[in-house]
Amino acid sequence: MPSAWLTLPRATVRLVSRRLDVSGVDEENEKVARQIPLRDLDRLIVTSGITLTGPALAALMDEEIPVVHMNHSGSRFLGSTLSPANHHAPARLLQYEISRSPERSLPLAAKLIAAKIRNQRRLLQRLCNDRKVDSATELARLNALHQRAHHPSDDSELLGLEGAASATYLSAWARLLPTDFPFEKRSRRPPLNPVNAVLSFISAVLTNEMTALLHAHGLDPALPVFHCADSGRPSLALDLIEPFRPVVAEALTLDLFSRQMLQSNHFQPTDDGGIHLNPEGRSKLILQYEKRVQREFLSTQRQHRTSLRQQLDFAVLNFKSALAQSPNLSPFLIN
C-alpha cells in the first residue's frame, strides 16, 4: 500500500502498536474501521476533517512517511507534514542559483517540455490508431513543435511552443471522448464541465504527490525552471509533472469516461459556478489513479520494470542530480 487516501468525514486516526487504526462513520451512518500497518505505507493523504492523533502523527514522522493534507473535496493541496530534512543544503543552493539564471534554467525547462510534447504525440498516435481516428495533421504539427522545443531561444519561445502543442494535442484528444461528455477548451478555476473537473482533480493529485516527493528529497517545490515562481504555488512540482500529464491526466480521464466508470451522477455544481466531482466520483477516480500509478510495466527508457509512481520519484532524484550537471536530466518518456 504505497499510498493511503483517507476521505471519510470526521474519521479519527490513532496509533495502535505499529499500525494506524482508522475509525469513522460513512455517509449512510455506517461505522467504518480500517487498519494500516506502518511498514506497508509510503505516504498518507488526508482530507480536512480527518483527525490525526499526536502519537499517530509522531509515528508517521519518525518513519519518514509524508502526510499530505487536502481540502474537503480532495482537489486542493493544503500542506504537508514531514520529518526534518537533512543533508540537502548543497542541492538547495544550486536550485536557488539556477532558478535565478535563465541561461542555466532554460536547458532544463526545454528538456521537460520537449519530453511532454513527445509524450503527447506518442499517446495521441497510440489512441488514434486504436480507435481508427485520423490525426495525421496534429501528429505532424506536434512532431515539428517537439523538434523546436529542444533548442528554444528564450523562455518566451518555449512557453509559446508548449502552449501551441497543448492546444493541438487537446483538440485532437477531445475527439476521442464520448459525445455525452464534450470538451471544448481547458477551464480550471472553476472547471466548467465534467471533463475539466476530472482533469483538474487528477492534476491536483499529481501535483500534490510530486510536491511531497520534492519535500522528501530536500528540494524547494516553489523554485521552478519553467513555470513562474509565485508565492504559494509549487511551481517546480508543476514543472516536473509536465512529461507525466499525457499518460496520467489525459489518458486516465479518457479511460474513466470511455469505460463509463464516471457518469453524470458523479458530478455536482458548486457555488462558484463550476462543476466538481461528488464524494462517490472522487472515490472512483482515486481508486483508478492508484491502480494506474502503481501498475508495473517494462520501461524501454530505463531498461527495467517500473511503475509511474517510481518514475515520479526518479524524476525528482534525476532533477536533483541534474542541478549540478544539467545534461544529465532525463525526463520520463512513454514507451
Image (tube, rainbow, N blue to C red):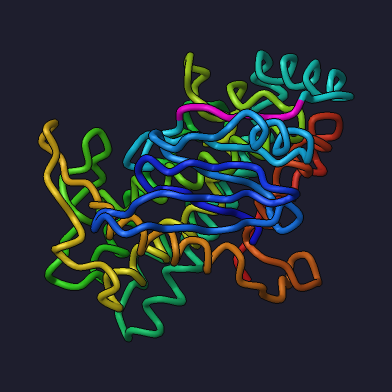
For the N terminus, the image quarter is bottom right
Residue 79 in magenta? yes
Residue at image position (70%, 41%) is 65
- Between 62 and 74, the residue placed more toward the observer is 62
Residue 314 in magenta? no
Q: Main secondary structure of the magenta part?
A: strand
Residue at image position (33%, 55%) is 282
- Between 3 and 100, the residue placed more toward the observer is 3
Quarter of the image for residue 261 reads: bottom left
Residue 52 on image: x %, y %: 54, 35
Residue 138 on image: x %, y %: 36, 63
Residue 149 shows up from this direction: no
For the C terminus, the image quarter is bottom right
Residue 176, placed above or below residue 13:
below
Residue 307, placed above or below residue 12:
below
**As drawn, is 139 to the left or to the right of 314?**
left
Residue 297, placed above or below residue 21:
below
Residue 225, placed above or below residue 290:
above
Residue 136 on image: x %, y %: 36, 72
Residue at image position (42%, 68%) is 124
The magenta segment: 78-83
Quarter of the image for residue 74 reads: top left
**As drawn, is 311 to the left or to the right of 11?**
right
**As drawn, is 274 to the left or to the right of 26?**
left
